[in-house]
Amino acid sequence: MSAAALAPVLQKLYGNERSAYHLTADYTWGWTQQESIQAATEALGWKTVNNVLTPLAQTDFSSYIAPVLNSGADVLVLNHYGGNMVNSLTNAVQFGLREKQVNGKNFEIVVPLYSELMAKGAGANIKGIVGSQNWDWKLEDEGTKAFVKSFGTKYGFPPSQAAQTCYAQAMLYADAVERAGSFNPCAVAEALEGFEFDGLGNGKTLYRADDHQCFKDVLVVRGAENPQDEFHLVEIVEVTPVGQVTYAPDHPMFAGGELGQCNPGA
Amino acid sequence: MGILEVKDVNKRFGGLKALSDVNLSVQENTVHAIIGPNGAGKSTLLNCLVGKLIPDTGSVMFDGKSVLGRKPFEINQMGISRVFQTPEIFGNLTVMENMMIPLLAKRDGAYRLHAIESIDHEKDLVETAEQMLKDVNMIDKRNMHSASMSRGDKRRLEMAMCLVQNPKLLLLDEPTAGMARADTNNTIDLLKEIKATRDITIAIIEHDMHVVFSLADRITVLAQGTPLVEDLPENIKGHPKVQEAYLGEAH
Amino acid sequence: MGSFILQILNGLDKGSAYALIALGLTLIFGTLGVVNFAHGALFMIGAFCAVTLSRMLSLSFEEVDPTKTDFLGQPLVVKTPYVYDWFGPEAGAAIIDWAVPLAILMAIPIMIAIGFIMERGLIKHFYKRPHADQILVTFGLAIVLQEIVKANFGANPVPTPAPTAFQGSFDFGIWLGFDPNIIIYPYWRMVYFAFAAVIIGGVFAFLQFTTFGMVVRAGMADRETVGLLGINIDKRFTIMFGLAAAVAGLAGVMYAPINSPNFHMGMDFLVLSFVVVVVGGMGSLPGAVLAGFLLGILESFASMNEVKSIIPGIDQIIIYLVAIVILLTRPRGLMGRKGVMED
Ligand SMILES: Nc1ncnc2c1ncn2[C@@H]1O[C@H](COP(=O)(O)OP(=O)(O)OP(=O)(O)O)[C@@H](O)[C@H]1O
Ligand SMILES: [Mg+2]
């Protein structure tokens, strides 16, 4: 989904003739993330030079980064999240990849999905790195403004994407329990199936009944070159409308099989 | 009053009474031999003197001060050095380095650190150590790793390490065990010379009667953890109790 | 060929951190006989010394700029580091830029003090206890230390860059006659390797050529006998604990620019460094260093695409595979001595 949002921006910034080298966290999220970004970039005409799976517990990515420059690739895609991403990006910049020229083009690094918190961990290394986000405190809608105001007044800094997610999920769960009239997980799941809502900062959002996927606008962001302060490490490049990132429930890449029977647990 | 006064010392190992009511008085500047059959408690007694073991009851006074309650390094600093029954040297160090350890302890005390000084800078200590090694005929093995030496050499090194501290009281636990006859005789000569030239008291445990009668001024016979007799060497030789003890009859 | 050299280089660099931590662990085990599970935490605290110094140097005074607003729409508070004010903006910026190397000076006394307090205050009481108790208490200590750091610095990694002069990478390949971009390596990681080599060499020289080191070596062989020869070995061993803490701390300080420090980084290294110690041989200092570099290089090789294409996922398990093989074939490790931890 984020891949679909990212692709047009990647095309605009880096063109159609690119060779990408993927480093991918070796677990389900990493695999699907990589698959979708590979499909989206290949649709643009990019080549995929290699996809290397890295252990989830890895902290030093130097041995995976070292061969990248000599692989013929001119883009490095880091399908990493959280601490993985902070370290792999830091290592990639350390290896001077962003200062190199390959195939007559500037070498680029792409992180398909990242957050302000990860940007903070990566520090100056995030400068110019393109990626996508669910939400950013700099959005202008009323829900976001209200949340930033009350969070910022209490803590002295704007909320991270994680803070917003936690808050929004707690609200959604409470609402679903109320509507279901029960704490039974199956009843709550049913209340959320096909549920459409707005006002929590992410714009109009749908929890599709068919495959339990969440659909909403996606932010394409870039690490700021000269952040005015520590809260502006990331700038919003584009808000890709939900229509552009929605796919059919039976899309071959994402179809995860039947949802199965709900099991309420003990 | 002797330089070493052991009073009513008892030591149990579980059900075994290794020492029972041991009294011993060692006079200054004498050689006092402790003999007795295997398992009599001789080594245990020595261990109680240097802080390696703590007696269950009784007192141990050295030079008018109690030894009990002090750590082994403090007891050494009081002037007691000891050679073990099984050689306890530092196998990972060279002969010279082994010699340096007791010398450093002697010069600097237990606490003072001579940290960043390189070993070769300690000229005075190196000279003293070399002299001592000459005295025990080991100067040619100066740079050898001590682990690779023969058992006899290890014993001589250990003795040198104790003698070089110039102790007031030297405790020797079977110093010639495992030595060749010639080395044993050298050791006797060395100890005789030390005794003649230094202010030193020696307590020696020995099974080799030749060594005992060459050196001892007084002899204590220990059997089953209790001193049987204490007397001049000439009186011990034919003592019936001693023969009884050595024949291993129940006492 | 190029990628081979590159991974050797990389392995040496990875191995530097392993060797430094394992060296400290072995110093503690070899002297005090304690298996110190808090050693990773000391590495982590070292890294946070770098974070702390760079924060201290960036301490700022605040002025309100009414022409600008902050994210809540209130007048913007502009922060200027005091060092800018004291030394001028250029010198001030340079001082902040060099925070990590400067932190070495700060870390040495702090780490030694922490080592002393740890040994005298806690670990001392566990010498006569079984190894399992020692492991539990030091592991607990590690958790406490990391929670203290988390409470003060937060759970997120804190970027702590190397001085600008050491950012970027050096093209070794050109230097060796290869084409450009084949063997490139970051400057700071080379600094790290050189630093580790100096520290390791320094520790060995200290033990080998000073009288203090000689007494410690004797004490490592036979603690009781050194005492009977009149030396208060406990005091020297406390100093060795401080030294081992300093080695771990310095390894952490210099590591800060390689990966942004976080409270958990000690645990990430801990398991690995124990594997290093076991492979090298419990209690063997040369073994720890050798195994550190060896495992670093093996890990690098295992992550090569050529290797991964033959045995997928080998990079995830290589370290443990080596540990298993060593334990089965040489239970005492590469350079371990008889009788260590065998009672
Ligand atoms: N640490 C110990 N624990 C239990 N029993 C011990 C210990 N040390 C010595 N013993 C026992 O105490 C008794 C006295 O032992 P000790 O070594 O003092 O005898 P010894 O007179 O020195 O004999 P030897 O002539 O064989 O050296 C022996 O029965 C021995 O087995
Ligand atoms: Mg004995």
Image (cartoon, helix red, strand yellow):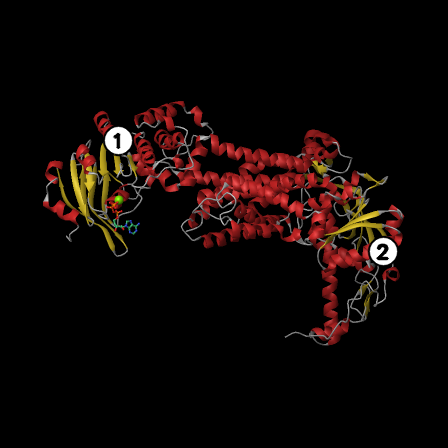
- The image quarter containing residue A165 is bottom right
Would residue C46 be visible to someone looking at this image?
no
Are dots 2 and 1 on a single chain? no
Would residue A92 be visible to someone looking at this image?
yes
Q: Nearer the viewer, residue B229 or B9?
A: B229
Q: Position of residue B44 (x, y in %)?
A: 26, 46
Residue type of the residue flagged with mark 1: Ala
Confirm or deny contact between disc 2 and disc 1 (CB under 8 A): no
**Label for residue B138?**
none
Image quarter for ligand 2 equals: top left
**CB of mark 2 near ligand 1 (< 8 Å):** no
- The image quarter containing residue A150 is bottom right
In this picture, is B206 found above or below B134? Answer: below
Subunit of mark 2? A
Which structural element holds mark 2?
Answer: helix
Instruction: Please state which of the two labelled residues, at mark 2 or mark 1, is closer to the viewer.
Output: 1
Q: Position of residue A155 (x, y in %)?
A: 69, 53
**Label for residue A40?**
2
Dot 1 alpha-carbon crowd within 10 angstroms: few under 14, some 14 to 19, many 20 or more: few
Looking at this rendering, what residue extends furthest in the bottom direction?
A: A181
In this picture, is C27 found above or below B187? Answer: below
In this picture, is B189 found above or below B53? Answer: above
Residue visible at 77% across and 48% down?
Answer: C74
- The image quarter containing residue C68 is top right
Residue at numbered disc 1: B182
Q: Position of residue C18 (x, y in %)?
A: 59, 43
Looking at this rendering, what residue extends furthest in the front direction?
A: B181
In this picture, is C193 found above or below A155? Answer: above
**CB of mark 1 near ligand 1 (< 8 Å):** no
Dot 2 alpha-carbon crowd within 10 angstroms: few under 14, some 14 to 19, many 20 or more: many
Residue type of the residue flagged with mark 2: Ala
